[in-house]
Image (spheres, helix red, strand yellow):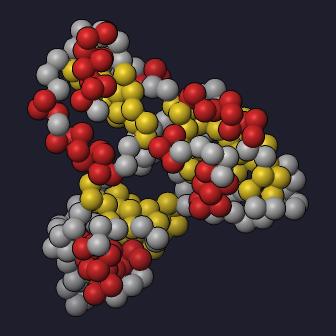
Amino acid sequence: MLDMAHRADQGSYPVFTDFLTTSEYMLLSSLQAQLKGIRTAYWGGHRDCDHVTAGFFPNDWSGMDLEIFPVVCIRVTPLSERYAQSLEHRDYLGAILNLGIERSKIGDIRICERTAYVFCKEEFASFVVENFISVKHTQITCEILTTSDELPAQQYSERIDSVASVRLDNIVSAMAGVSRSRAAELIRQGNVTAGHILRTAVSYICTDKMIVTIRGYGKFRLSIPEDVFTRKGKQKIIIYKFL
């Protein structure tokens, strides 16, 4: 990443990474002090995206328009609604990776009923459109979206719960529907990110509107209504699970 930033500085043009893992995002954040003369921006194709690429821009670059990031969105629809299966995120991702594409080239996959929206690096978009023809037993068709206006709003399932406190282990327990001890185990094993940063401290205090991703359980957004408690003094929370 430092080499890419150096190329942006020396060449006076933007340079972009692939989609970053959580550890790569954290590493790059820690390197910001070393990137003198370079501005860094992050973009995954939409403001709600969890997986992002990084762009390194020389300080004298005029503007940092997100449209120049080499990320596109592909709409995936079944050829026949009647015979389409109910497909999950892992079904779409597995089918795309089976085409021989590296995981770092694929960003978020958003599912809206029987349609999926796949964010990927621009250089692989045509290949995906031409070769991505089925998911499990469902035949599909793909098209590249020309504007983000065609992308529907992120959909969530909503659930109200209550917790003793907004410590991370309590929040993960509520979101994943597991015991507090199991939640603590997930956190310590490095399976939880909160605020796009890997968290391993069970006592970390979560904040309102925080995005929490739990490996194997999904991605969530936390809402903490101010001064809303149960009769037993527990904090009421609203859990939005990304669909």
Along the horizontal axis of the image, is 32 left or right of 19? Answer: left
Q: Where is residue 203 in the image (x, y as percent from the top left)?
A: 15, 73
The reply to whether residue 216 is visible in this rendering is yes
Residue 159 vs 4, above or below: the answer is: below
Residue located at (13% from left, 29% from top): 34
Residue located at (59% from left, 43% from top): 101
Along the horizontal axis of the image, is 166 left or right of 209? Answer: left
Classify residue 43 by image quadrant. top left
Q: Position of residue 193 (x, y in %)?
A: 31, 61
Q: Where is residue 200 in the image (x, y as percent from the top left)?
A: 22, 68
The reply to whether residue 112 is visible in this rendering is no
Residue located at (30% from left, 45% from top): 24
As drawn, which residue projects farthest toward the left? 33
Residue 84 vs 77, above or below: the answer is: below
Classify residue 234 by image quadrant. bottom left
Q: Position of residue 233 (x, y in %)?
A: 20, 85
Residue 61 vs 222, above or below: the answer is: above
Quarter of the N terminus within the rendering: top left
